[in-house]
Amino acid sequence: MQIKLKIWRQKNASERGKFAPYQVEAHPDMSMLECLDVLNQTLTEQGEEPVAFEHDCREGICGSCGFMINGVAHGPLPATTVCQLTMRHFKEDQELVIEPWRAKAFPLIKDLVVDRRAFDRIIASGGYISVPTGSAPDGNAIPIAKEAADVSMDAAACIGCGACVAACPNASAALFTGAKMTHLGVLPQGEPERHLRALRMVTQMNEEGFGGCTNIGECTGVCPKAIPLGVIARMNQDYLTGSWVERNKTVTILTPVTDWS
């Protein structure tokens, strides 16, 4: 099948970019990334610069790949990464407009590759639990309710691809941050640092230049792991509670003087 590709080409962040048209002979069973591999092989053989795009496992679990296809993050298929999106979902001679994530916090590196280290800095600010090192405890030592385990596992499915940021009109990272906070905060191991974690991660998220969440819902609509909007509500709750707790720590209580002797 013949596929027309209109791909954003940009040498680096300081130079102007533009869309470049290409024609590719693709097999219906090819993934979107394999289609780009075929294109790059042709470009290399012709002595042209191949298209830069990011990838790793190509199994839909690493979060490395990702770009916009006809204005939709990861393409038209719900709960699917571009590495798992096959060409059979497109029509003969269909034109696909491919461009990178567009967000201030994700500066462009080259072509379809953007710098997503802002996510790493959010995780480093508080996306962990402080526990003593040593041998792993017995799996039954800390009983965990089934409901809490389910919520934690659903949130932990987030692969940090950045599609939520790219789809959000505000370029918000609330879904990602909320997911990384929720999968720890609902478990007994993460409870002691729950509110401090929220303060640190939300503060870092804001410092990175992401926009604010206005609950439009585009983020969860394009999320390849279907992370629910509820993680944002939990993040906001933990942040407000943490802010109140920290504020009360700094309040000085004045005791009336009763003894003037």
Image: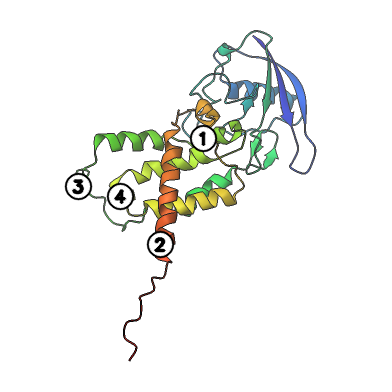
Mark before the other along the chain sequence, 4 or 2 = 4
- Residue wearing tag 3: 141
Q: Quadrant of the N terminus?
A: top right
Q: Residues within 10 Å of mark 3 (few under 14, many from 20)?
A: few
Q: Residues within 10 Å of mark 1 (few under 14, many from 20)?
A: many
Q: Position of residue 49 (x, y in %)?
A: 75, 31
- 3 or 1: mark nearer the eye: 3
- 2 or 1: mark nearer the eye: 2
| SS for callout 1 | loop
Residue 248: image tag: 2
Mark before the other along the chain sequence, 3 or 4 = 3
Residue found at x 56% / y 17% = 30
Instruction: Report, in whole angstroms, how far the alpha carbon at label 3 lies from the one at label 4.
Output: 11 Å
Mark before the other along the chain sequence, 2 or 1 = 1
- Residue wearing tag 4: 189
Up the image or down, 62 lies above or below 237; here it is above
Viewer-closest of 19 and 31: 19
Instruction: Report, in whole angstroms, how far the alpha carbon at label 4 lies from the one at label 2.
Output: 25 Å
Amino acid type of disc 1? Gly
Residue 63: image tag: 1
Up the image or down, 20 lies above or below 247; here it is above
Q: Position of residue 35 (x, y in %)?
A: 62, 20
Residue found at x 44% / y 49% = 239
| SS for callout 3 | loop
Q: Quadrant of residue 15?
A: top right
Q: Do the CB atoms of the residues marked 3 and 4 lie less than 8 Å apart?
A: no
- 4 or 1: mark nearer the eye: 4
Q: Is residue 127 visible?
A: no
Q: Quadrant of the C terminus?
A: bottom left
Q: Position of residue 116 (x, y in %)?
A: 59, 42
Amino acid type of disc 4? Gln
